[in-house]
Image (cartoon, helix red, strand yellow):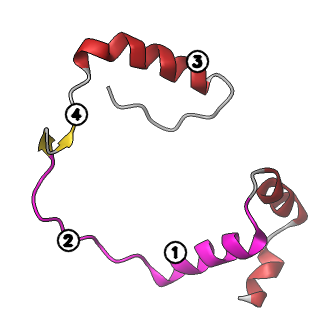
Amino acid sequence: MSSQTETLSDEILKQLKDKGVSKESALFQIETFKRGIPFTELLRPCTLGEGIENIDPDRDEYISLYESKTQSKKVIKFVC
């Protein structure tokens, strides 16, 4: 793993430190992705009440909470 250290620039190391991620943890994650992550074998599909919760009655409350918490963050996806 030590050969990976050269690929982590000073800027990346600073970003990792700012986010509380150790260099060792980042290198471990890189190696994990290089090796690949096996697929999970599902027992059955998720359905309402079985892994998926319906939040319709509280939808506005959750949207407000989401908006207040994400103002200073980069959001990737919100499924509604």
Q: Secondary structure at mark 4?
A: loop
Badge 2 amino acid: Glu
Disc 3 from disc 2: Cα separation: 36 Å
* Whole-percent x, y for residue 66 in the image: 49, 23
Q: Earlier in the sequence, mark 1 or mark 2?
A: 1
As displayed, is residue 4 above or below residue 41? below
Disc 2 from disc 4: Cα separation: 22 Å
Q: Disc 4 designates what residue?
A: 53
* Whole-percent x, y for residue 36 in the image: 44, 79
Disc 3 from disc 4: Cα separation: 22 Å
Disc 1 from disc 2: Cα separation: 19 Å
Q: Residue at 14% across / 45% down in the picture?
A: 50
Q: Residue at 73% across / 61% down in the picture?
A: 21
- Magenta residues, as a range? 21-46
* Whole-percent x, y for residue 32 in the image: 53, 78
Q: Is residue 32 magenta?
A: yes
9 or 17: which is nearer to us?
17
Q: Disc 2 designates what residue?
A: 41
Q: Earlier in the sequence, mark 4 or mark 1?
A: 1
Badge 1 amino acid: Phe
Q: Earlier in the sequence, mark 3 or mark 1?
A: 1
As displayed, is residue 12 above or below residue 64? below
Q: Report crowding for label 1: few under 14, some 14 to 19, many 20 or more residues within 10 A (C-alpha).
A: few
Disc 3 from disc 1: Cα separation: 33 Å
Q: Earlier in the sequence, mark 3 or mark 2?
A: 2
Q: Residue at 80% across / 60% down in the picture?
A: 12
Quadrant that contains the C terminus: top left
Badge 3 amino acid: Ser
